[in-house]
Amino acid sequence: MDIWEKMYEEAKKLYDPHEVSPFVYANHVVAAIEAEDGKIYTGFCFAPTA
């Protein structure tokens, strides 16, 4: 598996779009980045909808 596939698979684990409340939508945007040491960091978006 190349690094792009690995990063995609790591980010995909976080993808779970859902409403937390009527004003907050979460996990609809996810990302992965590779550090110089090879470690992969992931994150997701948690945003107000109003």
Image (tube, rainbow, N blue to C red):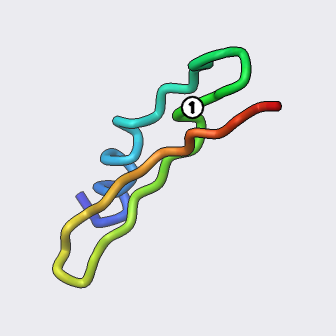
Q: x, y (%) of residue 32?
A: 40, 58
Q: Is residue 47 above or below residue 50?
A: below
Q: Residue at x 46, y 34 (%)?
A: 15
Q: Which residue is mark 1?
A: 26
In the foreground, 49 or 35: 49
Q: Residues within 10 Å of mark 1 (few under 14, many from 20)?
A: some
**The N terminus is located in which quarter?**
bottom left
4 displayed left or right of 45: left
13 displayed left or right of 31: left
Q: Number of labelled discs?
A: 1
Q: Which residue of the protein is positioned furthest toward the bottom in this rendering?
A: 36
In the foreground, 23 or 30: 23
Image quadrant of residue 33?
Answer: bottom left
Q: Is residue 33 above or below residue 9?
A: below
- Three-letter code, disc 1: Ala
Q: Residue at x 34, y 36 (%)?
A: 13
Q: Which residue of the protein is positioned furthest toward the right in this rendering?
A: 50
Q: Residue at x 33, y 45 (%)?
A: 9
Image quadrant of residue 28?
Answer: top right
**The C terminus is located in which quarter?**
top right
Q: Residue at x 26, y 63 (%)?
A: 40
Q: Secondary structure at mark 1?
A: strand
In the foreground, 5 or 15: 15
Q: x, y (%) of residue 2?
A: 28, 64
Q: x, y (%) of residue 18?
A: 57, 20
Q: x, y (%) of residue 39?
A: 19, 68
